[in-house]
Image: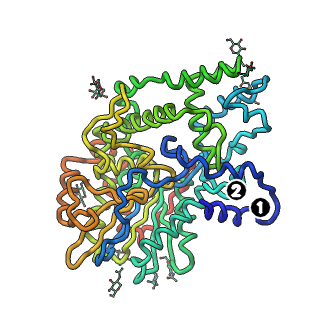
Amino acid sequence: MLSLILSALLASPVAQGLVVPQLVELQKIGTQDDIFPYLAGDAPYFSYPNDYGIPREAPESCEMTQVQLIARHGERYPSKSRGRKLFKTWYKLSNYTKTFNGSLSFLNDDYEFFIQDLDNLEQETTLENSVNPLNPYTGEMDAKLHARDFLQQYGNLLENNTNLTVFATSSRRVHDTAKYFIDALGSDYNATLQVIDEEPSAGANTISAGYSCPAWNESAFSNITDAYSDKYLENIAKRLNKQNPGLNLTSSDSFMLFSWCAYEISARGYSDICDVFTQDELIRYSYYDDLSNYYSDGPGYPLIKDVGSNLFNATVKLLKQSEELDQKAWLSFTHDTDILNYLTTVGLFDDGNPLNATYVPFRDHVFHKSWQVPMGARVYTQKFQCSNESYVRYVVNDAVIPIESCSSGPGFSCPEDDFYDYAASRLQGLNFAAACDVTSVSNVTSLTYYWDYNTTNYNATLLDQ
Ligand SMILES: *[C@@H]1O[C@H](CO)[C@@H](O)[C@H](O)[C@H]1NC(C)=O
Ligand SMILES: *[C@@H]1O[C@H](CO)[C@@H](O)[C@H](O)[C@H]1NC(C)=O
Ligand SMILES: *[C@@H]1O[C@H](CO)[C@@H](O)[C@H](O)[C@H]1NC(C)=O
Ligand SMILES: *[C@@H]1O[C@H](CO)[C@@H](O)[C@H](O)[C@H]1NC(C)=O
Ligand SMILES: *[C@@H]1O[C@H](CO)[C@@H](O)[C@H](O)[C@H]1NC(C)=O
Ligand SMILES: *[C@@H]1O[C@H](CO)[C@@H](O)[C@H](O)[C@H]1NC(C)=O
Ligand SMILES: *[C@@H]1O[C@H](CO)[C@@H](O)[C@H](O)[C@H]1NC(C)=O
Ligand SMILES: *[C@@H]1O[C@H](CO)[C@@H](O)[C@H](O)[C@H]1NC(C)=O
Ligand SMILES: *[C@@H]1O[C@H](CO)[C@@H](O)[C@H](O)[C@H]1NC(C)=O
Ligand SMILES: *[C@@H]1O[C@H](CO)[C@@H](O)[C@H](O)[C@H]1NC(C)=O
Ligand SMILES: *[C@@H]1O[C@H](CO)[C@@H](O)[C@H](O)[C@H]1NC(C)=O
Ligand SMILES: *[C@@H]1O[C@H](CO)[C@@H](O)[C@H](O)[C@H]1NC(C)=O
């Protein structure tokens, strides 16, 4: 943590004596990490909490032969639509004429809302656009630290080929994350970025298959998720309204306060609004996010396995070609939902117990959405060789997550041929193009960018989405 703060400090205008940091702010930064896992993947990056401690490095006398990364963009400002709702709630508070009481009393002290420039909506947080020059949680710094970690873990894979092609979707923040990552690799590497279109017309040749899936319906299972009680949101509003008569916050305002808390940490380094919540409320909010994503982008929605099959199938093909392909590291940047879709097809977090809206399943609860795809999420596929045998396994946000039915290899990996059988069984009967009705938006029926980038040069126009 200290090194994060120091690096932010050195890179910031403070170092040039332009801004005087408030001691009180410095004391708050770094004190809220415990709540990141409850904030619906909107807070800064954190490592997977349920880590068995299996080392990420290749096991003793084994050597990495290929690595693949599917990563989320880094810490960012809210989307435009979320920003609109946040402002509605903020205006209620900023127009309140009395003195605030209770957990909102920080608003009495010259508080400035963390969204100060609407142009920042949808964008990565950077050292430049941060509200506080000491903010250690920028998407920019996260991507750069990730690149250093990547080199430390997997740098050997680049020893015979310092040319590296990196892939990003055409979302500006996704693109920017890949750029920061590439910058931090340094001048020993010659990395080129291929920008893969995320417009529906890209069809199957995409890292963001959800955009090419007109058959997808976010509320297909609202018949299940609508039953989740929002009593906890009512209670928050009631409590704050009681402490501050005339405030009139609603349940939707309460919901927005969680987003405010999460995004403000990524823009300012800390957020006083987070102190409004009790631990019970954080758990209920976090479970709502798990539940709704389980049924919109996860194992609870059968179509999602088809959506994720587009990318999973390609990653399996890359594994099979690891010897013939010169490039040994395949790095791709995209959105959280695309990673959820992919992981759903891989099957790492699907124990077959459907999430239930009527209670929090503390015991049977494998699908923690925000643990899988926090800002800056990084899902690695490792292939390594020990003697003459090869093995495959996954590392999600720094933790080795074994495949439940295939972990007999070193470091709880899956023997290569068994892995291909496993993959074939996961892909059995799936069909992205047909299930998603892709042909209604595109004629492109296969994912080719990993194989034709050197002749195609992907440079799609960037989108603010
Ligand atoms: C509150 O303040 C903002 C700007 O400060 C204003 O645009 C808004 O209309 C005000 N009223 C309400 C009810 O939000
Ligand atoms: C603020 O809280 C104190 C103590 O609970 C109470 O006495 C006071 O009336 C409250 N102020 C308002 C405006 O409600
Ligand atoms: C680099 O080339 C050497 C010599 O051919 C080989 O032994 C080594 O495995 C290669 N490294 C990688 C990462 O492929
Ligand atoms: C990188 O690629 C360029 C062009 O394809 C090639 O000329 C160069 O030799 C490559 N460099 C390395 C270190 O492989
Ligand atoms: C770097 O990569 C680009 C694109 O592949 C290539 O054109 C260029 O020759 C490479 N430069 C070096 C020094 O390898
Ligand atoms: C919910 O709706 C889906 C269709 O969107 C249907 O397949 C499913 O059976 C319904 N489930 C319940 C519990 O009503
Ligand atoms: C809150 O609601 C009460 C009763 O509906 C109303 O009189 C009051 O003006 C409202 N306050 C604000 C700040 O909107
Ligand atoms: C949730 O649990 C209740 C009570 O055990 C049960 O009746 C219901 O069918 C479950 N719903 C789902 C979607 O599993
Ligand atoms: C996987 O890709 C192969 C071609 O490499 C294709 O024949 C097969 O239909 C694909 N399977 C799925 C489930 O996408
Ligand atoms: C698919 O290709 C046909 C024939 O080239 C063309 O007429 C049609 O517009 C294309 N459809 C889409 C969705 O691109
Ligand atoms: C492009 O890449 C493929 C496979 O990686 C390789 O076989 C081919 O020679 C490359 N073409 C060029 C023009 O570099
Ligand atoms: C992408 O590159 C092609 C060929 O180099 C060029 O014609 C096209 O305008 C470029 N598109 C964008 C969006 O930069």
Q: Where is residue 229 in the image (x, y as percent from the top left)?
A: 44, 23
Element type at mark 1: helix
- What is the spatial separation of the Cα atoms under label 1 and label 2, in whole angstroms? 8 Å
- Name the residue that disc number 1 marks: 14
**Residue 111 x/y as whole percent:** 76, 38
Q: Would you call the spot at circle 2 few (<14 residues within 10 Å), some (14-19), or many (20 or more)?
A: many
Please, is residue 162 above or below residue 82 in the view?
A: below
The image shows residue 144 at horizontal and vertical percentages of 56, 65
Q: In which quarter of the image is the N terminus?
A: bottom right
The answer to whether the residue labelled 1 contacts the one labelled 2, judged by CB atoms less than 8 Å apart, is yes
The colour mode here is rainbow
The answer to whether residue 201 is seen in the rendering is no
User: Is residue 132 something that shows in the picture?
Assistant: yes
Ligand 6 lies in which image quarter?
A: top left
Given the image, on which type of amino acid does mark 1 rest?
A: Val
Name the residue carrying label 2: 134
Q: Amino acid under label 2?
A: Leu
Q: x, y percentage for residue 88?
A: 66, 29
Mark 1 or mark 2, which has the lower sequence index?
Answer: 1
Residue shown at 76% from the left, 26% from the top: 95
Determine whether, in the image, residue 214 is placed left or right of residue 105: left
Is the CB atom of the residue marked by disc 1 within 8 angstroms of ligand 1's nearest atom? Answer: no
From the viewer's side, name the closer residue of 207 and 357.
Answer: 357
Q: Nearer the viewer, residue 166 or 21?
A: 21
Q: Residue at x 29, y 78 (%)?
A: 61
User: Which numbered dot is residue 399?
Assistant: none
Viewer-proximal residue, 444 or 17? 17
Depth order, front residue of 130/122: 130
Q: Residues within 10 Å of mark 1 (few under 14, many from 20)?
A: some
In the displayed structure, does residue 282 sit left or right of residue 363? right
Is 4 situated left or right of 99 in this image? left
